[in-house]
Image (tube, rainbow, N blue to C red):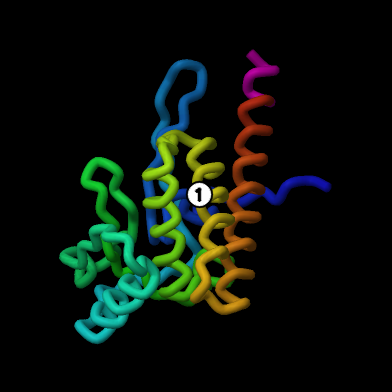
Amino acid sequence: MEPTRYPARLMPDPFGCGSAGKASSKSSGESQDLMMFTAGRNQIGLTEKQIAYCMEAWVVLCADRPIAFDTSEAVQYASRTRFNEAQNTVFLGADAVPGDGVDANARLSTLACLAHELAHAERFYLGYRRPTDLPDVLLDEAETSLRAPFTSVLSPKDREDLVEDARDRLIQWLALRQQEGERDAQS
């Protein structure tokens, strides 16, 4: 079966639940920046009520684990929900809320998005160090989306969407690896 190829403008974001991310792809010794856009995570800054819901959800997800949760960027347009390893903190962004897109990442519920970021934090505590370059960042995101469904408070639909998100990221990884292989074969 041939991997699905996404035009760059439709390829889901390789970073977290993100609305837009930037990754570096190295080819032939050069660094090339690629912009990746999802097909629809929310970008409008969150309301006080949405932020309060996210804070409550975070407490439930974390149970007795004290993982820092910063909401200071959530009201900003196009802010990204993400785990920052250097600060050991999950930042809440506007994209914690699902949007209008049809891909699995765009459909992730707020709870599934936060469970994904919690999985990043858990993997960090286990000693995983995340790649930052394409295509390997896609493997990290896929693995994180496969770990997140084991969060006990998620609904069956949340689990399914996270697994589909992992599948989509693996398809993207395969497509990029194939493109790299074709470039290497030509040189």
Is the C terminus in the top left, top right, bottom left or bottom right quadrant?
top right
Residue 43 at x, y percent in the picture: 33, 69
| Furthest residue toward left | 72
Residue found at the very far top of the displayed protein: 187
- Magenta stretch? 182-187
In the image, residue 163 sits, relative to residue 57, either above or below, namely above
Residue under the point 70% across and 51% down? 4
**Dividing the picture into quarters, in which one does residue 79 lie?**
bottom left
User: Which residue lies under the disc numbered 1?
Assistant: 141
Q: Judging from the image, what secondary structure is the residue with disc 1 in?
A: helix
The kind of secondary structure the magenta stretch mainly shows is helix
User: Residue 7 at what x, y percent from top left?
Assistant: 58, 50
- Amino acid type of the residue tagged 1 in the rendering: Glu
Name which quarter of the figure residue 139 lies in. top right
Q: In this view, does 54 lie to the left or right of 167?
A: left
From the viewer's side, name the closer residue of 92 and 60.
Answer: 60
How crowded is the residue under tag 1: few (<14 C-alpha within 10 Å), some, or many (20+)?
many
Residue at image position (49%, 36%) is: 134
Tell me if 12 is positioned left or right of 179 in this view: left
